[in-house]
Image (cartoon, grey):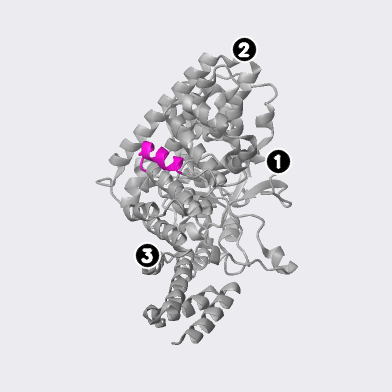
Amino acid sequence: MNLEEAIQQFKQAKDLFEKDEIDQAREIFEQLSSEINPNQGQEFQKAYVSVQVILGEIYQYQGKLEKAIVAYRNIQQEKQWWSARVQFNLGFCCLKQERVEEAILDFKHIPKEEKEWYSKAQYTLGYIYYFNKDFDQAIVFYGNVLESQEELYIKAQWEILSIYLDQNKLHEVYKKFTQIKFDQEQYLREIHYQVNLFKKIIKMKNRDQYFLMFSKIKKILSLLIIEQDKDNLIAHYTTPSVAYLMLDHKNQQQVSKLRLNPTDFMNDPTEGALIHQLFSLKAQEKPNAQIEQHKSFIGCFTLHHDSLNQFRLYGKENQREASGVSLVMNRSTLFENQSNFNFLNHNVFILEQVLVDLRNLKIQQKEDSENSKEQPKFSDLKLPLYRCIYFDPDSGLIHVAQREEWTFCREKGSCQDNGWEEYKLKIDQVNKSVRELIADIQKLIKEINPAENSDEAELIEEILLPLRYLIKHYAFKEEQECRTIYITQWNDEKIDLDPKLNRIYVDYQSILPAMEKIFLSVGALQHESTLQYLGQTADKTFNVKRSHNPFRT
């Protein structure tokens, strides 16, 4: 292939790419990659490198990480303007494949002179070391982010502050927080709740106790997040008619998304109020302004996939007991895999949005009004999934949601060597730790004595806000519920109205990618064939099973 032909094909591929015909563009770039000989001269070498850069980024964009790595490795040693970007993308691909040591070496290879990519690499290294609990090294790498990269620098400073808070180095927390200027807070908008909370705490005379309380809330959330392999499947009970709306991808242009619903219609009248009894707080006659301006939306799930109790309570079609379906889904597909406070803010911070800048892969938006209307207003939510805490006000007993032994026995068809004992040990430790942390918070609140000061009472309510709708009455313990929560303000555009039900809601995500199987209650067997038909998708298949529970409908 001569140079002129290569340039023509390159332009053709670029045009296809700009029209969003990425597969066709990739095929041409792949052909160019195999036919251009970089040893024919400097111009051929430049053309070859350009093809590898774009091809690598297309592979990365499409999730073909191994191919992306090969393309990047082909030009890793090139000292060109794009080399730092290539080096970063290479490290990120390795990180996504859990080749952590390779990723670390790639990120460390980026020189300080490449300010943007160096800072992104240092931030990512901080994240890697933090994830592996090497907090001293995490602080070092977060601290290497250059001040000239202002947004990433402020985020890195906040990460260091958070580590100091976890280590109870409160003097360092105050120092870091007071160094953040007012005009820099825009870079922390995704953690608006925490920033505002810290502003209030800093002004309190007993701020150490408030910071410790916040730190313990953070630890409770990290314990409640569901991450065990044995809990990777979660169930959502609903009516067959709602299931059709969420699963019928064959007869609808767009399937309905899973909805997060307001707490107004929960069957537990103590929803949101039990927290006062748990922490011996006097409920305010009028909720403080911070609580009052928030509205909570909840998605409810259970660790019991085929439960007669759930079928009798939920998903009742025309109010008939045991007439619903249990949609069993892969938890890790639907939910964030680590605890955070993102459910308290409109803007969800995703690490990759900050770190990955695939400049050649920004699809140009269509300018005509019709296509513009088709563009979604905002991206789907992806939030953590937490176990509920069950609390008995009469005895003070506390227990976190978990699977029960019968679910292990039923799953394996045997009560022997089914993994229950190992699971039970882990859950017992979670229970113990949650109880200890709650006792610590109760002690801190007693020391503060908020009954004497309304401002302190309001601040405590605000600190406890993330737990408010994770605490349920022990009478509902059989449900073993887990929840995703979105707490927002009334002016949030994500809040929508269903005019048929006269009920507000927030769309979450389509459940189709996460579907694993469906259980039919005894009163819903007539839907078996239809749901099995909907379960045959182009990408995956999920099975429909009949409930094993006896019940006379």
Image coordinates of residue 192 in percent, x first then y, are: 61, 38
Look at the picture and state if 348 lies above or below 286: below
Q: Nearer the viewer, mark 2 or mark 3?
A: 3
Residue, disc 1: 490
Q: Dot 2: within a 10 Å radius of its alpha carbon, few (fewer than 14), some, or many (20 or more) residues? A: few
Indicate the amino acid at tag 2. Answer: Glu
Residue, disc 3: 77
Image coordinates of residue 289 in percent, x first then y, are: 69, 29
Q: Which residues are magenta?
A: 132-144
SS assignment for the magenta stretch, majority = helix
Indicate the amino acid at tag 3. Answer: Gln
State the residue at coordinates (52%, 15%): 446
- Asked if disc 2 and disc 3 are in contact, CB closer than 8 Å, the reply is no
Look at the picture and state if 391 lies above or below 320: above
Residue, disc 2: 452
Q: Nearer the viewer, mark 3 or mark 1?
A: 3
Q: CA distance from mark 1 to mark 2?
A: 31 Å
Viewer-closest of 529 and 151: 151
Indicate the amino acid at tag 1. Answer: Trp
- Label 2 element class: helix
Q: CA distance from mark 2 to mark 3?
A: 67 Å
| Mark 2 vs 3, N-terminal side | 3
- Label 3 element class: loop
| Mark 3 vs 1, N-terminal side | 3
- Label 1 element class: loop
State the residue at coordinates (51%, 25%): 211
Q: Dot 3: within a 10 Å radius of its alpha carbon, few (fewer than 14), some, or many (20 or more) residues? A: few
Task: Judge left or right: residue 304 versus residue 201.
Answer: left
State the residue at coordinates (48%, 51%): 120
